[in-house]
Image: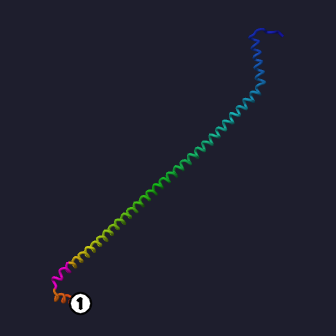
């Protein structure tokens, strides 16, 4: 065997041999590592896709639940407003009825007070008339006129 001292040829041959040996021996080792890594990456991608699909489904469900909750809240709000309007209307009607009753009571009280005042005025007028008659009567009636008045009053009472 002859030794070749040409560095260009020697290094290239050695390098080709080393690379060939490395590829031959490390193919299985590195190939296995790379294959396992590729499988792990693919599995992680599948898991991520599954999680994405699940998250998308949950988001869709949550959005539909939110829409249903908003509809229910709107219905509750509308029902509440209608109930408030009904209560307000009922309160207004009660207030009007109470005011009418108060007005009617006030009118009845005024009528009763007017009747009482009329009665007092009649009584006072009658008492004043009686007082005037009693004060004027003795000077107008003599004994004979008093006897006639008493007799006519007795006769009227007997006929009545």
In the figure, 114 relative to 35: above or below? Answer: below
Main SS, magenta residues: helix
Depth order, front residue of 113/99? 113
* Quadrant assignment, res 97: bottom left
Determine the residue positioned at 67% across, 36% down. 44
Q: Residue at x 74, y 28 (%)?
A: 31
Question: Residue at image x 33%, y 66%?
Answer: 106
What's the magenta region? 132-141
Residue identifier under label 1: 154
Percent of width and height locating residue 109: 33, 69
Residue furthest right as drawn: 1
For the C terminus, the image quarter is bottom left
Query: Is 137 a magenta residue?
Result: yes
* Left or right position of 123 against 80: left
Task: Quadrant for residue 7, please give it.
Answer: top right
Q: Nearer the viewer, residue 6 or 30?
A: 30
Judge from the rendering whether residue 45 lies leftward or rightward of residue 18; answer left or right.
left
Q: Position of residue 110 (x, y in %)?
A: 31, 68
- Tag 1's secondary structure? helix
Is 89 placed left or right of 45 in the picture? left
| Left or right position of 159 against 48 | left
Closer to us: 52 or 133? 133
Q: Is residue 83 magenta?
A: no
Q: What percent of the width, then of the height, locates residue 153?
A: 22, 88
Report the quarter where the N terminus lies: top right
């Amino acid at each position: 065997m002859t030794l070749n001292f040409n560095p260009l040829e020697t290094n290239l041959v050695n390098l080709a041999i080393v690379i060939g040996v490395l590829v031959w021996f490390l193919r299985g080792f590195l190939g296995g590592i790379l294959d396992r890594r590729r499988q792990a990456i693919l599995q992680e991608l599948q898991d991520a896709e599954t999680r994405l699909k699940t998250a998308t489904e949950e988001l869709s469900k949550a959005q539909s639940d939110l829409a249903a909750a908003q509809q229910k809240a709107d219905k509750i709000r509308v029902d509440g407003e209608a109930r408030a309007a009904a209560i307000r209307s009922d309160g207004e009607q009660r207030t009007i009825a109470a005011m009418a009753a108060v007005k009617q009571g006030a009118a009845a009280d005024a009528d009763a007070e007017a009747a009482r005042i009329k009665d007092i005025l009649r009584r006072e007028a009658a008492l004043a008339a009686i007082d005037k008659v009693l004060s004027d009567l003795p000077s107008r009636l003599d004994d004979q006129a008093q006897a006639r008045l008493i007799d006519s009053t007795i006769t009227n009472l007997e006929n009545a």
